[in-house]
Image (spheres, rainbow, N blue to C red):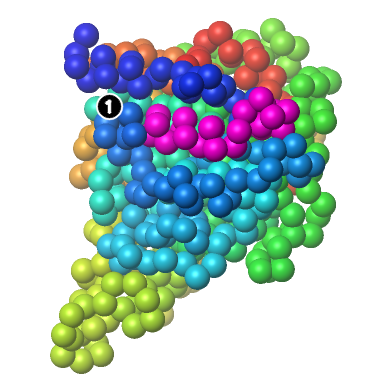
Amino acid sequence: MSDSASHSSGLLASFRVSGIPCSAHEVAGMVASRRLGPLEAARASLERLRAVEPALDAFLSVASLDATSTSAISPGEPSSTLAGVPIAIKDNICTLESPTTCASRMLENYRSPFEATAVAKLRARGAIVVGKTNLDEFGMGSSTEHSAFKPTRNPWDLARVPGGSSGGSAAAVASGIVPIALGSDTGGSVRQPASFCGVVGLKPTYGRVSRHGLVAYASSLDQIGVLASTVRDASVVLEALCGEDPLDATSSSLPPPELLESIDEPVDGLRLAVPAQARSGANHPEITRVMNETISALQHAGATIVDVDLPMLDESVAAYYVVAMAEASSNLARFDGVRYGRRAERPVDLMDLYCRSRSEGLGAEVKRRILLGTHVLSAGYYDAYYATALKVRRLIKNAFDFCFATTGAACHALLMPVAPTPAFKLGEKQTDSMAMYLEDVYTVPVNLAGLPAISVPAGLGRVADAAGPLPVGMQLIGRAFDEATLVRVARMLELACAAACSPR
């Protein structure tokens, strides 16, 4: 076995450091019953972080024990459903005690004067933030190689990417540093790294979770999501995050869902739609094999599989990148070197200040997306590109609604791969932007439609040049604001595939 493979195997040791269980649900239960002190879990998490972080590069900042102790609550309080649970936060979500850099030189030393609503809600439940995780700069990437500071490595094979843009959060959960982490999902940035790292990645319905404190990339697509070691853990966190927020006008006024009451109850008469486009010949053979085995396992568990045709999915990548880049061009205009962020030294005039501050502070991928977004919004191109992409977006939403609500194909959820490949090698797609963008082919339709979706580990793929087997996730897509059914189906999938893929 190579040194890389040996080291990678070592990183997969259990989170049971000093007797701490790996499940957030178990940690909270032990703290609530006073069998474990909140800071004991935090210390174990930080010890694990120090042991594996030099190989992974998953974190951009790490909390001190003094900082974590201020956020710990007394065990046994009624609100402490996450009491003492160590968590990690993607570094495009604002926190008070650590910088919020978005993995960009532009915000290298930026400290937010406020905390994200999502983080505040988790602290109120007793969670302890142990650090901020690495990402593709401003969330723009699918490999966490576009960080301005360092690439993150996949715990299963250190020569491979963890996915992106929430790669740091996925690697932190997969390597046992924390049982749960927050990420953000604009076009698959929670689900794809979850698949690559063999963990659960849950993206809620657009508006279900407040975006206040999430640094905007594409505002109509962005959504805070959860990476966790189990479907139950992801559901615990989502229950804590949901609810209307007066600081976010796009947050839903619907009451938060009760996810845990029925999570272990199988869905009666479960019907899953499988789009013909998900069986693409462009999929890696191991993705196809795992999907077929997943379908067989779900059928054995009583599910009915319905084949459907969703031709608009083929247009989703093009529509997504027009919409996302246009919104990125608008959102990132605020980083101009004047109000906050990187400021060029000794500018000769205002235009020089703008140009040099942005040129020095923003990475190549971010610049590419801003330029393309500005182009599609410009006079003479707006109707041809942006307006057309919005029409395609509506058709994609209509196609999903058709599957859920009409004809004999009416289903509880759709099943498809998360990505067309398992984790690829570091540097493999760095010079081919189109190949990198096509990694999102199965995830971006969900964001365009604003639907909830979850990635669940479904099997292990055998890739010839890998250090060992690589995890493969399958994606379930649910009806808008019906996360309760989605997590029940995901729990069925998790149980059906439990023997096939375990990251620990």
Residue hosting label 1: 158
Q: Mark 1 packing: few (<14 Cα in 10 Å), some, or many (20+)?
A: many
Residue 476 or 17: which is nearer the viewer? 17
> Main structural element of the magenta stretch: helix, strand or loop?
helix
Query: In the rendered image of this protein, does residue 360 appear above or below residue 121?
Result: below
Residue 306 or 497: which is nearer the viewer? 497
Residue 488 or 241: which is nearer the viewer? 241
Please state if 24 lies on the left or on the right of 339 as rendered: right
Number of numbered discs overlaid on the protein picture? 1
Residue 241 location (% of width, % of height): 67, 49
Which residue is rendered at x = 33% and y = 16% of the image?
9
Residue 65 location (% of width, % of height): 45, 45
- In which quadrant of the rendered view does residue 105 lie? bottom left
Which residue is rendered at x = 42% and y = 36% of the image?
46
Element under disc 1:
loop
Residue 333 location (% of width, % of height): 39, 75
In which quadrant is the N terminus drawn? top left
Which residue is rendered at x = 24% and y = 87% of the image?
351
Query: In the rendered image of this protein, does residue 256 appear above or below residue 499?
Result: below
Query: In the rendered image of this protein, does residue 481 appear above or below residue 373?
Result: above
Residue range corresponding to the magenta coloring? 28-49
Please state if 333 lies on the left or on the right of 279 as rendered: left
Please state if 146 lies on the left or on the right of 379 as rendered: left
Residue 400 visible at all = no
- Asked if residue 387 is among those painted magenta in the image, a careful observer would answer no
